[in-house]
Amino acid sequence: MIPREKHILMLQRMMRIRFFENKLIECQKAGEIVGALHTYTGEEGVAVGACVALNDDDYIAGNHRSHGHPIAKGGDINKAMAEIFGKEDGYCKGKGGSMHLADFSIGILGESGIVASSVPVATGAALTSKLQKKDFVSLVFFGDGASNQGACHESMNLAALWKLPVIFVCENNQFAVTTSYKDSVSVDHVSDRASAYGIPGVLVDGQDVVAMYEATEQAVIRARSGEGPTLIEGLTYRYEDHSLGLANVRRDGNYRTDEELNDWLNRDPIEIHKKFLLSQKFATKEEIDKMENDEIIAVDEALEFARKSPYPDAKQLFDDLYTDPINFA
Amino acid sequence: MIKNNKSVGIIVNPNSGKDIRRLVSSAFVVPQQYKSNELLKIYEGLAKYGVNKVYVMPDFSDVSRKARENYSKLIDTVVLKTRNLDEESTTIDSVKKMNDLDLKCVIIFGGDGTSRLVSNYLKDVPILAISTGTNNLFPENIDGTIAGIAVGKFLNIANEEKFSYKSKKLDIFFDKDYVDSALVDVVATDIPYIGARAVWNMGSVSEVIVNKVKPTGIGFSSIGFNLAKNLKSDESIYVKISKNKRKSNLRIHSPIAPGRIEEIFVDNWKLFKKNEIIRIQTNKGTLALDGERRLEFDYLKKPNIKINNDGPTCLNIKEILSK
């Protein structure tokens, strides 16, 4: 049974992601952030349900739409905001940007803009766990588009073969940029593909953070007990375009309808979980309002932190590109 | 061969066979290709018996496409239009539309949960439910070809009421307000949330009400079968699960999920009749209907359960196929 504290934590982290992303949207529209911004609003239930079911020393790896993943794992939003602003106090000293929020101390391996490239990274981390006889599991988030990539299939095959403690979480937000997964994925559900590797595949309502938690918790138990990987598909929806302003790129009009978007807005993961907390008397409306206010303040403070942080010195440009574990230098 | 232009409805649950039970038991993923092929077989049976009109529920993967294209010269298929796809509301919308179509039979392709949902909204149309889910007791475990033949023959039978039977169900009330029904079993758990829906941990189960038993049944109904091998048309079983193993007078083993045989400690159990009301004693939790957590309750809003003999009308396929 999920304890009350975790239910509360899940709402708090979903709110934190939502306000963080909304603030970034404001900043980008104001011209304060340069470069592409792939926001996670609408998909919070997937990351938070999955990450809250993990331990601090379990690993996660993300993708190009990954601001939500480190926050869901308990990452520092000051450092995340500074990184996205390209500032020295950011997670990667401001040299990684939006797609590189890594914090090994709490198991965040980082993300990558190369679609599906984090899937073998997480599989490798799971191999480490197995070879070194550690207890940690790794979990990777990837999209419906990434599920078609060779790296994804190869990783699942190897992980199944070697019974690695890895959890593959497909965030099926139904569009790869502007291509519907109906037009690009050969099966009805990405989780159907699990049977090809001989591993469990589970389809979960990604808007229900509790359902995501339960599925991940069981996958973690399976992974830690040496039974191998699981593929979880969280069916979800992103509220914004692939990256901000992308709808204008299409010449043939919108790739999705307002009606469809509204249907999903009516199944908002934060609102669903708020109602749940109230109905279970896990929290009062006043407590939820206070939490919301606290998170808004925390995000405002993160923004101020990022604004005040200096840009990295140009001389540091080539620092930290490679690790040097055996001290070649 | 068919006397009149009689039509059949088909509901295929695109999401059956994909839930968390693939992770917590030895259940397997049921791919869409399997469902698509089963539909082909059903169409073969229907076509051989002259059925020429089929209405199908729409779904994201268009699971009926192969069947309706291959049999387009023999069977006119209409894919119903609904607003959303692959959600419960798609099934409900489709069933409501089917109610207005003067259908002679609706074929349900899914599990106990799908059969329950369709039956809750379908009015006076006989059904044939075929299993594609996990622990299914209500649907028939038969090949699509045979299902198609059975439905085809049924549409050609003059005295059709002799080849179908009325099933019973369990109605759930909060106080006196009807809220839902179950076809196979109702399970009270102390899990306060619906979450991933399935129930797989006996430690969370406090009460089990079984409406239908089968020697080959898997799931919570198998607890009922352990206690009563047959149920009359007006009776069901109530089982109180013991939380204290030492105080339990009765210990049984039941296959509550594929590959999972659990030791179950029974506090007490009884058969109950149609006119009795079973009041759930658990103070707070969820009720699982036909294997899925559906209704949250607490001590202020406690469920009552009653047998209702006005359940869905089912095809008696043994009788139909023997005719």
Image (cartoon, grey):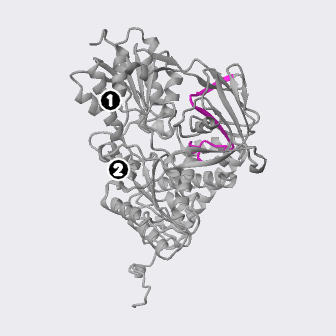
Task: Name the residue nearer the viewer: B111 or A253.
Answer: B111
- The image shows residue A194 at horizontal and vertical percentages of 40, 53
Name which quarter of the figure residue B84 lies in: top left
Helix, strand or loop at disc 1? Answer: helix
- The image shows residue B159 at horizontal and vertical percentages of 42, 9
Q: Nearer the viewer, mark 1 or mark 2?
A: 1
In this rendering, the answer to whether A70 lies above or below B127 is below
Task: Work out which quarter of the rendered image holds the C terminus of chain B and state it.
Answer: top left
Task: Work out which quarter of the rendered image holds the N terminus of chain B and state it.
Answer: top left
Q: Is residue B225 left or right of residue A170?
A: right
Marks 1/2 in contact by CB < 8 Å: the verdict is: no
Task: Name the residue nearer the viewer: A283 or A298.
Answer: A283
Q: Which mark is residue A176?
A: 2
Residue type of the residue flagged with mark 2: Ala
- The answer, for residue A255, to whether it is visible in the render is no
Neighbour tally class for label 1: few under 14, some 14-19, many 20 plus, Cα within 10 Å: some
Residue found at x 59% / y 24%: B169
- The image shows residue A200 at horizontal and vertical percentages of 45, 53
On whether disc 1 and disc 2 are found on a single subunit, the reply is: no
Query: Which residue is the site of mark 1?
Result: B145
- The answer, for residue B188, to whether it is visible in the render is yes
Q: Is residue B31 left or right of residue B283?
A: left
Magenta-tinted stretch: B177-200
In this rendering, the answer to whether A180 lies above or below A127 is above
Helix, strand or loop at disc 2? Answer: strand
